[in-house]
Image (cartoon, helix red, strand yellow):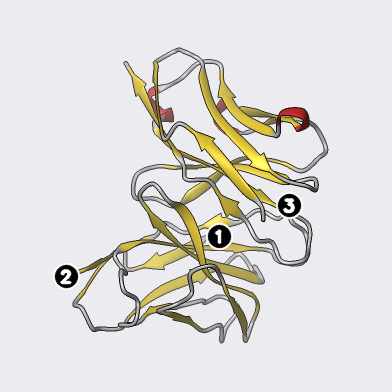
């Protein structure tokens, strides 16, 4: 079964500091990976997705993620945190096999300290 | 503007009552999904539909029912058989087909509280 593990349910960073949100996946076949962001009481919005075209994926709002097969990781980074980045972030994985079943991680809440 | 709408935003239900959550999309997507979100548990799939008049159970379908009579609409009914229905419910859609890189687009959610 596919799964993702997000390390750290809560992460705090200072404004202007590096943001690093960790995601590891389990897989015996090549996965497809996604990062979503959720603001309070709202739906999820896609930040970026990995589809095997390039290992370094750039997304919206200055975020990027690097697929590392040897480490089974897909960590999300942003060089400089902004107050508006405070939200919950979800890593997700899907695999080939017809219908798109997506498995989500439990989420990481990012707090940005002024 | 194209998108997904969910209504109502907040819903209160008495124990023993059925309640229906609305989900409408104008993205011309074939596939639609219902997820349940609980604190610290991420999103869990309740039901999904790949095409009109067809739907499949997800990981936590017990106590829920759905219909897909129109491409644009995928209502979810929370029945009295659902033991713990208080949660945030999210509807999503995607263009469908076999592509696993297909992006799911989410509605704003409905927060259901059982009194």
Q: Do labels 3 and 1 share a chain?
A: yes
Q: Do labels 3 and 2 share a chain?
A: yes
C-alpha separation, residue under disc 3 versus residue under disc 2: 40 Å
C-alpha separation, residue under disc 3 versus residue under disc 1: 20 Å
Instruction: Kindly identify which residue carries mark 2.
Output: B115
- Give me the chain letter of mark 1: B
Asked if the residues shown at circle 3 and circle 2 are in contact, with their CB atoms under 8 angstroms apart, the answer is no
Instruction: Kindly identify which residue carries mark 3.
Output: B101
Which one is earlier in the sequence, the residue at label 3 or at label 1? 1
Q: Is residue A99 left or right of residue A38?
A: right
Q: In this view, does B26 lie above or below B99?
A: below
Residue under the image location 62 percent in, 49 percent down? A3
* Residue B31 appearing in the image: yes
- Give me the chain letter of mark 3: B
Q: Is residue B108 left or right of residue A23?
A: left
- The percent position of residue A95, horizontal first and vertical second, equals 74, 54
Classify 10 Å Cα crowding around label 1: few (below 14), some (14-19), many (20 and above): few
Classify 10 Å Cα crowding around label 2: few (below 14), some (14-19), many (20 and above): few
- The percent position of residue A81, horizontal first and vertical second, equals 46, 19
Quadrant, the N terminus of chain A: bottom right
Residue under the image location 78 percent in, 47 percent down? A28
- The percent position of residue A101, horizontal first and vertical second, equals 65, 61
């Amino acid at each position: 079964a596919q799964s993702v593990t997000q390390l750290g349910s809560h992460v705090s960073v200072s404004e202007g500091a590096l943001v690093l949100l960790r995601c590891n996946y389990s897989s015996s076949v090549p996965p497809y990976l996604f990062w979503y962001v959720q603001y309070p009481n709202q739906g999820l919005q896609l930040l970026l997705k990995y589809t095997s075209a390039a290992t370094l994926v750039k997304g919206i709002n200055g975020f990027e993620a690097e697929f590392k097969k040897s480490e089974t990781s897909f960590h999300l980074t942003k060089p400089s945190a902004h107050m508006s980045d405070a939200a919950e972030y979800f890593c997700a994985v899907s695999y080939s096999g017809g219908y798109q079943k997506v498995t989500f991680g439990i989420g990481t809440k990012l707090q940005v300290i002024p | 503007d194209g998108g997904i709408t969910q209504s109502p935003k907040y819903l209160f239900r008495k124990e023993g009552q059925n309640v229906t959550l609305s989900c409408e999309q104008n993205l011309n997507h074939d596939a639609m999904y219902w997820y349940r979100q609980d604190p610290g548990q991420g999103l869990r799939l309740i039901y999904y539909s790949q095409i009109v008049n067809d739907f499949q159970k997800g990981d936590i379908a017990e106590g829920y029912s759905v219909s897909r009579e129109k491409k644009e609409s995928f209502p979810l009914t929370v029945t009295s058989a659902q033991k713990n229905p208080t949660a945030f419910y999210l509807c999503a859609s995607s263009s469908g087909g076999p592509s696993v890189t297909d992006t799911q687009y989410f509605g704003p959610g409905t927060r259901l509280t059982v009194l």
